[in-house]
Amino acid sequence: MKITTLVENTSGGDCKAVHGLSFYVETKQHRLLFDLGPDKTVFENAKKLGVDLGAVDTVVISHGHYDHGGALRQFLELNKTAKVYIQRSAFLPHYSKVLLAKIDIGLDKALLNHPQLVLLDGDRVIDEELTVFVSHVPDTFRSEANASLLCKDGQDDFQHEQNLLIREESDVLFMGCAHSGVLSILESVPGVRPKICIGGFHIYNPAKRKTVSQTQLQTLADALGAYKDVRFYTCHCTGKKGYDFLHARHDNISYISCGMKLEV
């Protein structure tokens, strides 16, 4: 399996960094994208990295926030055949609360009925390689960074969030922001314990530019001690302070920036 980071908040090379996330993955059967980032950055970086987005056959969008699915319209204009798997509720209104303002951070609702979209209401086994699933375990961590995220009726419950399990020689779990809680998601993985987990931990609030409290960081670090057999590549909404804290305590946690490539 080959994994290339197309969009992420940081870049160590020529790729453009932007607040968002997108991974390109080559498996035995698929050329897929997990998330699309917020804008045209995914196309610019794909060109620099030699990735043909027109050859992608599958897209999984993790949740209904623009920094993960903002480039959907442009992608559908480029690629007329790929299936896009997304929770139906991802197209409901989503907001970020900044001071007294409520800012729309949702997806383009005009795309809801696009023929390439596969709207889900929970888990879906796509084939023997790919499974999309939601968190089925209550989030006991409850990241403070979720406090400013709203849906139409109040606090967001993140029922629109899904994750991707790819089953090959090494089972790999992809998360977007883990709003539902990285621990809850790990416990919800259907049938296996992944060897690798890639995605954000959502312990940084970009609107407030603030990492969760030291108490929460320590709670998460302690809980991740039960997953020393899992290799974590974190990014995006984990933030530098949160990553440094976790990495100092666990040598199985690394950071994956835009332009980086993994073979597993």
Image (cartoon, rainbow, N blue to C red):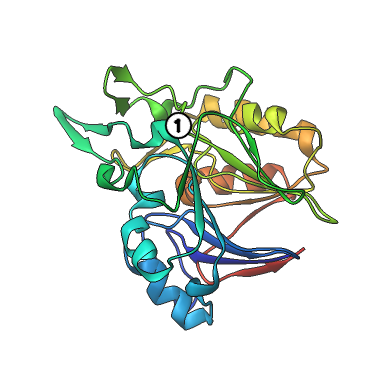
Q: Closest to the observer: 117 or 38?
A: 117
Q: Is residue 125 above or below residue 30?
A: above
Q: Amino acid at mark 1?
A: His
The quadrant in which the C terminus is found is bottom right
Q: How many marks?
A: 1
Q: Residues within 10 Å of mark 1 (few under 14, many from 20)?
A: many
Percent x, y of residue 251: 74, 50
Give the image quarter of residue 100. Answer: top left
At 26% from the left and 33% from the top, the residue drawn is 95
Q: Is residue 166 left or right of residue 20?
A: right
Percent x, y of residue 232: 69, 49
Give the image quarter of residue 18. Answer: bottom left
Percent x, y of residue 109: 27, 42
Q: Which residue is mark 1?
A: 160
At 47% from the left and 75% from the top, the residue drawn is 46
Whether residue 117 is visible = yes
The quadrant in which the N terminus is found is bottom right
At 59% from the left and 40% from the top, the residue drawn is 163
Q: Closest to the observer: 167 or 81?
A: 81
Percent x, y of residue 71: 35, 59
